[in-house]
Image (cartoon, helix red, strand yellow):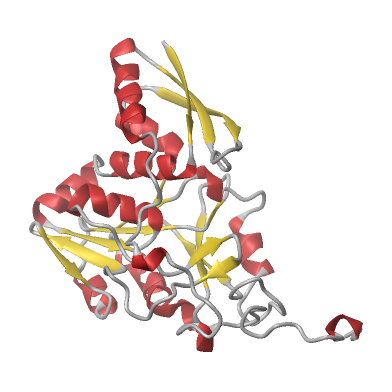
Amino acid sequence: MILQISLTVPETKAVIARASALLPEVRKALDGGRIFLKGGTTVSMLAEELAGMKLGICGRISPLGAKGPKYVQLDAPHSIVIENGQVKSVDDTEEEEVLKLKKDDVFVIGANAIDIHGNAAMMAGSSLGGPPGRILGGLMAEGVNILILAGLEKLIPVDISHAVKACGRKKIDLAFGMAVGLIPVFGKLITEQTAMEIFADIRCTVIGKGGICGAEGATTMVVEGEKREIKKIYDLVKNIKGVSTSGSEKSLKECIKAGYGCSDDLACIYKNPITPGFWDDEK
């Protein structure tokens, strides 16, 4: 049996979260280990699945560009650790909590870019990538399970290595929003396509991308398998249809000029508007 489905970007994030919650390494860590969830809208969906809470969202891409949150104090933690059924905020102790992770524990992060080879990278608009940037390199050397949750709307048409070389906070002269660089992230990549194949014993093929009327960035797929397995996918899709972006309400409001993060932002045209005559300078 073959089923065709189309999912909006928030819906793909919900599918990724629900499938990720079923992974053996996640279930094992829930039973007797630690799960570190680093905030992002897809990871926030997983936090809803595992802990019944939304995470605070920091950096994001909005219609205006690469932006941060409006408020200094968010209404939910950006990163949490789940241990023995208890949830704690680790926004002020990320490095300390990463050092506690053992080989069977799980670190979950999102990505802003993925390529066809399964490589991923996270945008960094703060100096040294902020707290996440300062721990990622060491984290990948620790040997813990790293899950990267990223929908196919993040797929870029070049290798991640090329994208990393093309950008950089101090390289960019002008930016709609904060200038960003890219930090490569390595781990098990979960997209909506792989999520479908985790959720049921089916074969999933992406046949289209994009749409209109709210389906911009959508993924259209066909899933093939036995009828009882297809029903699992059908029920999943019916259940998540219409979901919205995950993240605490206050944190989803984006920064404005002279917001708290402006002091660390580079090249932002909203922070430093272009002056008359700027384009007359040939340099």
Residue 273 visible somewhere in the drawing = yes
Is 199 situated above or below 159?
above
Return the x and y of residue 165 as percentages of the image width and height. 65, 68
Res. 147 visible in picture:
no
Q: Is residue 12 above or below residue 106?
A: above
* Quarter of the image with the C terminus in it: bottom right
* Residue under the point 21% across and 66% down: 101
Task: Return the x and y of residue 196 as percentages of the image width and height.
Answer: 38, 31
- In the image, farthest residue toward the bottom: 263
Q: State which quarter of the image contains the N terminus.
A: top left
Name the image quarter holding residue 107. Answer: bottom left
Q: Residue at x 47, y 57 (%)?
A: 111
Q: Seen in the image, is 142 located left or right of residue 123? A: left
Residue 99 appears in which quarter of the rendering? bottom left
User: What is the x, y in percent for residue 23?
Assistant: 26, 41
On the image, the x and y values in percent for residue 176 come to: 65, 71
Instruction: Tell me which corner region of the image, top left, top right, bottom left or bottom right, holds residue 103.
Output: bottom left
Toward the viewer: 220 or 73?
73
Residue drawn at (40%, 45%), measured in percent from left and top?
13
Q: How many marks?
A: 0
Looking at the image, residue 47 sits to the left or right of residue 82; the answer is right
Which residue occupies the foreground of this view, 229 or 243?
Answer: 243
Position of residue 71 in the picture relative to residue 211 (left or right): left
